[in-house]
Image: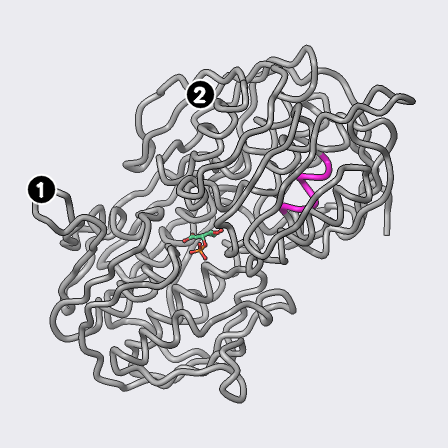
Amino acid sequence: MRDATPAAWVASPGAPLRGTFDVPGDKSVSHRAVMLASLADGTSRITGFLEGADTRATAAIFARLGVRIEAPAPGERIVHGVGIDGLRAPDGPLDCGNAGTAMRLLAGLLAGQRFDSVLVGDASLSRRPMDRVIAPLAAMGARLGGEGGSGRAPLRIAGGRALHGIDYPTPVASAQVKSAILLAGLYADGTTTVREPHPTRDYTERMLRAFGYPVDIGDAASGSAGAVSLQGGGRLRATDVVVPADFSSAAFFIVAATLVPGSELRLRRVGVHPRRTGLLRALAAMGADIDVLPSGESGGEPVADLVVRHAPLRGIVLPPDWVADMIDEFPAFCVAAACAAGSTVVRGAAELRVKESDRIAAMASGLRRLGIAVDETEDGATLHGGRLRADTGAGIAGGGIDSGGDHRIAMAFAVAAQCAGGPVRIDDVDNVATSFPGFDTLARAAGFGLAGAGA
Ligand code: S3P
């Protein structure tokens, strides 16, 4: 079922953002919870599951692979695990929709099955690079490839291959690549080790442990910092997973409340995993006023209430080694930079070009249309904020942009419009339902000026 998001929005300055809100469950954690619960022995209950199109696609795929998954209430799944070797051959291609996490992690997991499978995705996912998982999986003995050797979906994965462990230094800092290799490693002979150039979110490793699977997460003391290892041939034990609220969804509200004068917003029980919260560091360096009030753990992840008050921002040179910790937050961050005094410099962020859209190009062209000067580079951009318009007093002008079918671009421009001198029409917003169903309703309740504009 699709969210009832309209095809276009007209967003304009609303009221100061006030109140206490819960954003939906974490996308990364929801995907992994369904995957590991499906492979476990026994029944697992997932609460706080993200009812987004991406994570529902993953659940639908495991149903096609023979796993019984009940949905007794929104945000809840009961997964009757089939055991590590219990998946059944699907009766046709498996549709990952827009979800890169689903396709890349499943590539690893399916490479170890007895049966063949084919992974397909929407137009955006079919453009994204899959060679980054194909190469290491092939090195483990898997046979898989994109259409015509293209390194792009559809991905055909041959079953019945004997996999062997590898020690793989990943050239890109990517939790999806790391996770694909580790999931294949469950089915491989011997030890599988992944070494990352920069640490990324470690949900797969930690969730494997929560499901009773031993994983060696390297540390400085043992001289193996940045390495993750596991042995193939083990089993997973069912467990219940409580999914925290998604920091990446909270990010749009964090930036909006920072930018709109008079705002004071509380976001409850948001996952604040350090590999996800680089945006908080960046905004703090720009002068933001955000309290992080720890409120315990949710599913083994640290969670906190975030209290965000309006504050004027100043531009910064973003340290490149913060990039991986805020990789999904750049659309929102670019809006913050556009409204800051002075320029903000982003480098070392070439990965943004291969997300659901080319997010460097999408933000640069959209912000330019709204009167912000942006110098684009191959691996980032310099955003010139703080040039207040004489006519409206606003740094951002009204106008029209197209999200290019990218959920985070659509939501970022809804935030930008809250500080614009006139209405901003945002076309192609259906994809917001992939990660944040109900964004428009929650945004309006918080004070956003945001209306559906129909097709
Ligand atoms: C994700 C990892 C990141 C992130 C994506 C979710 C994950 O992608 O951008 O939204 O759940 O592992 P990369 O691994 O490509 O950096």
Q: Quick check: marks 1 and 2 in contact, CB under 8 Å? A: no
Q: In the shown orientation, is residue 206 left or right of residue 256?
A: left
Instruction: Work out which quarter of the rendered image holds the N terminus and state it.
Output: bottom right
Task: Please tell me whether residue 427 is drawn above or below residue 190 in the rendered image.
Answer: above
Q: Residue furthest bottom?
A: 148
Q: Earlier in the sequence, mark 1 or mark 2?
A: 1
Q: Position of residue 289 (x, y in %)?
A: 52, 15
**Circle 2 SS class:** strand
Residue at which label 2 appears: 305
* Residue visible at 11% across and 72% down in the picture: 190
Q: Is residue 409 magenta?
A: yes
Q: Please name whichever residue, 96 or 56, is drawn nearer the observer in this view of the structure.
A: 96
| Disc number lying in front (1 or 2) | 1
What label does residue 201 carry, if any? Answer: none
Q: Which residues are magenta?
A: 408-414
* Residue visible at 66% across and 50% down in the picture: 376
